Amino acid sequence: LDWISNILINPLTVSDATAAGITQDLRNNARPVIYDESEASSKIESVIDLARRMSSNNGNKTLRGSSSGKSLSNNTNTIFLMGSIQVARLKSSDRSRFFIVNMEIDKNQDQQKYEDAKSDAEIFFTIKERIFAYAYKCIPSILESTKVIRKYLINKKIESRQADQLAACLACYYVYYSPDPIDETTAEIMIHNLDLLESDYYEQNKETDQDDCLDTLMQ
């Protein structure tokens, strides 16, 4: 998490923080949030609820009352990265909003692999402002690529919210190969090469037969 924190620009890095504390510190700034030691607890459940609300860019404000009689508003759309030994319990509505990444234990204790990874990270530390500027410049391409990739995923029967998440990530991934929007053929090849439709993420988050039946009836 320290490496990732150093790569990002002005993240909010916390541990043992409440959802209210995070909201008040963020105010209306879309700073990425890094939450360390996010072990399962009622406090973390509230933080996960906050992350869910902040993942929806629907323009709705979150209003809270105060002792002064004036409402406190928040309308932040941002991302969360959470680290823990045990994964916190996720509701069904949250599973497709989070990627769960398991750290693999290096049984051979290969020090060279660690040094190589550390060296790669240190390169990012020195150019992170340029990477951010490039990504900002490419936002129109990213948005267009997101639409193309999402359409392809939906046609492959990927659940809508899962397609939203995957499409945004893949569009950002692709922009570092080309500043131009992706086309349908390239999107199909990229997704095939990444084996996303055969991944654990897809299997764990795909709709059940009952969900698929309900979606079909509601169309």
Image (cartoon, rainbow, N blue to C red):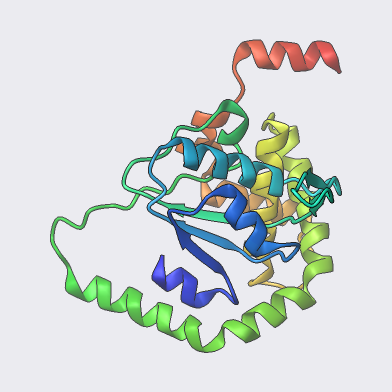
Q: Position of residue 153 (x, y in %)?
A: 70, 39
**Residue 161 sits in quarter:** top right
> Who's the residue at 46% across and 69% down the image?
4
Q: Is residue 155 above or below residue 48?
A: above
Side (left or right) of 68 relative to 207? right
For the N terminus, which image quadrant? bottom left
Residue closest to the far left: 108
Q: Is residue 92 above or below residue 29?
A: above
- What is the total number of numbered labels drawn onto the structure image? 0
> Who's the residue at 45% across and 32% down the image?
89
Q: Residue 71: in sight, yes or no?
A: yes
Residue closest to the far bottom: 126
Side (left or right) of 104 relative to 160? left
Q: Is residue 70 above or below residue 130?
A: above
> Who's the residue at 79% across and 15% down the image?
216
Q: Residue 184: in sight, yes or no?
A: no
Q: Position of residue 145 (x, y in %)?
A: 77, 58
